[in-house]
Image (cartoon, rainbow, N blue to C red):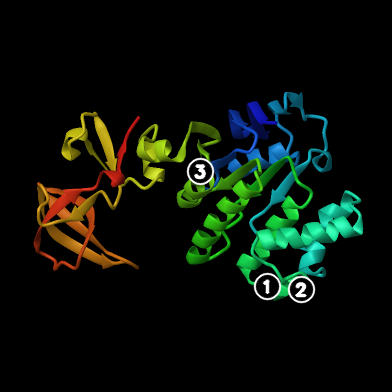
């Protein structure tokens, strides 16, 4: 089973929110649609769900056109940023909702709910009110509810963005495990590249309504298709490949590309320093140019030697 988008365009008046997008999601595959706010990714997801009508193009499932199929008959599960739980229902009541709509009998329904709560790490929470849960717990309930009817495709629209950074990172790891354990076919919309690369088998980068690059996370991270994509993926300095010893025309440097190392081949002068959670971020001058670097505490004006960390280097194009 597979989702196929062919030349999807969505217009609001004269404005094209999505322009000529083609993309596929294979059986059991998790694809992340990654891009900045306003690039059209949520509009594309809503079009797949049937909540928006494309101006042109086709949404197909197993080669069947879904144009005339309403939202509730597409067999897709939806998880939104705020979870959209029913506040008057218990945790179990929320998770069971889709099963009730599918007229699953009570005994089977109860077994499925308990199984899903265990899967999402909420065993023993069945009788709690969702209003008594933390934000992360509520998102787990939303995920369990979406998984309950065994959707053929799970659509997640910024499912973790309302959470704080530490919780978001942990829940991304948990969600990646859950999707694989459940063998769920999924499309995840996010603006956070760490989240996308944690969750996805493939990443599709979207910019100004178009998909500009699709590939495995490691490939997209190390070889962004152009400078704009490289900037979105954290590159803040662009230099000839020879600067880092690579036989390529141009590379992008992330903040971690240069590290203080007494045996490093480069020498610079510290201009600024900023303490971060687990390291010190430096601004250094090398041959008249300013670069970001990471390393131990250094005083402004210190001369430091720097090593190149290729994990922080992106080959452009």
Q: Residue 225 lies in what quarter of the image? A: top left
The quarter holding residue 62 reads top right
**If you read the primary sequence from the N terminus, does the residue marked by circle 2 or circle 3 appear first?**
3
Of 247 and 189, the residue lying toward us: 247
Residue under pointer 3: 35
User: Which residue is drawn at the image coordinates 39% and 38% (left, top)?
Assistant: 228
Tell me what residue is drawn at x 39 percent, y 41 percent.
Answer: 221
* Rendered view: 159 above or below 77: below
Calculate the distance from the C-alpha at mark 3 to the C-alpha at mark 1. 30 Å
| Residue toward you, 4 or 283 | 4
Q: Are marks 2 and 1 in contact (CB under 8 Å)?
A: yes
Query: Whole-percent x and y of residue 208?
Result: 52, 37
Q: Quadrant of the N terminus?
A: top right
Chain-order first, disc 3 or disc 1: 3
Residue 133: mark = 1
The Cα atoms of the two marked residues, 2 and 1, are separated by 7 Å
């Amino acid at each position: 089973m597979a989702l196929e988008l062919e030349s999807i365009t969505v217009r609001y008046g004269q404005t094209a929110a999505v322009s000529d997008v083609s993309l596929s999601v294979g059986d059991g595959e998790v694809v992340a649609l990654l891009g900045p706010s306003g690039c059209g990714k949520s509009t594309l997801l809503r079009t797949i769900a049937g909540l928006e009508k494309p101006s042109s193009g086709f949404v197909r499932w197993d080669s069947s056109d879904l144009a005339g199929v309403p939202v509730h008959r597409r067999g897709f599960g939806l998880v939104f940023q705020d979870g959209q739980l029913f506040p008057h229902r218990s945790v179990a009541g929320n998770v069971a909702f889709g099963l009730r709509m599918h007229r699953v009998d009570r005994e089977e329904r109860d077994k499925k709910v308990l199984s899903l709560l265990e899967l999402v790490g909420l065993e023993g929470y069945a009788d709690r009110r969702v209003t008594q849960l933390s934000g992360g717990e509520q998102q787990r309930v939303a995920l369990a509810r979406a998984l309950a009817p065994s959707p053929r495709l799970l659509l997640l629209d910024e499912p973790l963005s309302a959470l704080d950074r530490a919780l978001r990172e942990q829940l991304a790891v948990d969600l990646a495990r859950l999707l694989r354990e459940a063998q769920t076919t999924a499309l995840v919309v996010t603006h956070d590249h760490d989240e996308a690369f944690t969750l996805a088998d493939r990443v599709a980068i979207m910019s100004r309504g178009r998909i500009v690059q699709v590939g495995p996370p490691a490939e997209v991270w190390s070889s962004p298709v152009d400078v704009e994509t490289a900037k979105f993926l954290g590159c803040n300095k662009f230099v000839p490949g020879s600067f880092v010893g690579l036989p390529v025309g141009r590379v992008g440097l992330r903040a971690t590309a240069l590290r203080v190392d007494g045996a490093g081949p480069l020498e610079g002068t510290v201009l600024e320093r900023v303490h971060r959670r687990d390291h010190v971020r430096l601004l250094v001058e090398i041959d008249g140019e300013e670069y970001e670097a990471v390393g131990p505490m250094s005083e402004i004006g210190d001369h430091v030697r720097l090593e190149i960390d290729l994990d922080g280097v992106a080959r452009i194009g």
